[in-house]
Amino acid sequence: MGVDQANDIDALLPQTQCRRCGFDGCRPYAVALAAGSTALNRCPPGGEALISRLAALLGRSVLPLDPDRGSAGPPLVALIDETACIGCARCLDDCPTDAILGARRYLHVVLTADCSGCELCLPPCPVDCIRMVPAPDAGDQTLPWEAIQTRARRFRSRHERRQALGARRALPA
């Protein structure tokens, strides 16, 4: 396994950081794929297009999407029911792209252009005021590969920025 191959794989992944593959994000999944320790069909957001590209890159056979990981479909974004949100701020910490704006005891809102559709904001919400809806740029259609890659670059940038900010906060003063 080489770092270059993991980087090449990571560049193909949709960068939703959704963990539906069973890993803590897209980068750990890419590293495991490069090491040959996991299957290439575990990414529902990437769907069949990603599986085909990973198979070609890794010299493996194309497999159907693992149904235990979910199903592929149009990209989704979170939508917060403003009348039900209590402003607990629990969803803020779990959003890997900082797409949720708000503060404790204040209304929260999702920046749909920055929401990767990972669904990680759903479990911590104590009042179930968050639901997933089709992304405005996709409607009910699966996006073409170029659009998936454009979204992935945006999500990767936001995720890396959030990680860097978290690392700076963790440094001793």
Image (cartoon, rainbow, N blue to C red):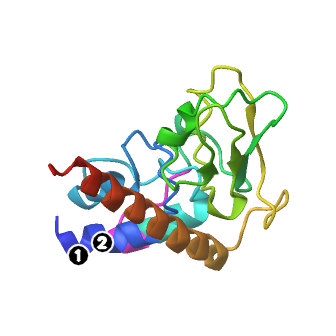
Label 2 secondary element:
helix
How far across and down, in percent of the image, does residue 4 sit? 23, 75
Residue at horizontal 63 percent and vertical 45 percent from the top:
102
The amino acid marked with disc number 2 is Asn
Label 1 secondary element:
helix
Residue 131 as seen in the image, left or right of residue 164: right
Give the number of the disc on residue 7. 2
The amino acid marked with disc number 1 is Asp
**Residue range highlighted in magenta:** 55-64
Q: Looking at the picture, does residue 166 appear above or below residue 141? A: above
Give the number of the disc on residue 26. none
Q: Residues within 10 Å of mark 2 (few under 14, many from 20)?
A: some
How far across and down, in percent of the image, does residue 61 sit? 42, 61
Q: Residues within 10 Å of mark 1 (few under 14, many from 20)?
A: few
Do the residues under discs 1 and 2 have CB atoms within 8 angstroms? yes
How far across and down, in percent of the image, does residue 86 sit? 70, 26
Residue at horizontal 58 percent and vertical 27 percent from the top:
123
How far across and down, in percent of the image, does residue 80 sit? 75, 40
Q: Main secondary structure of the magenta part?
A: loop
Q: Quadrant of the N terminus?
A: bottom left
Q: Looking at the picture, does residue 149 appear above or below residue 31? A: below
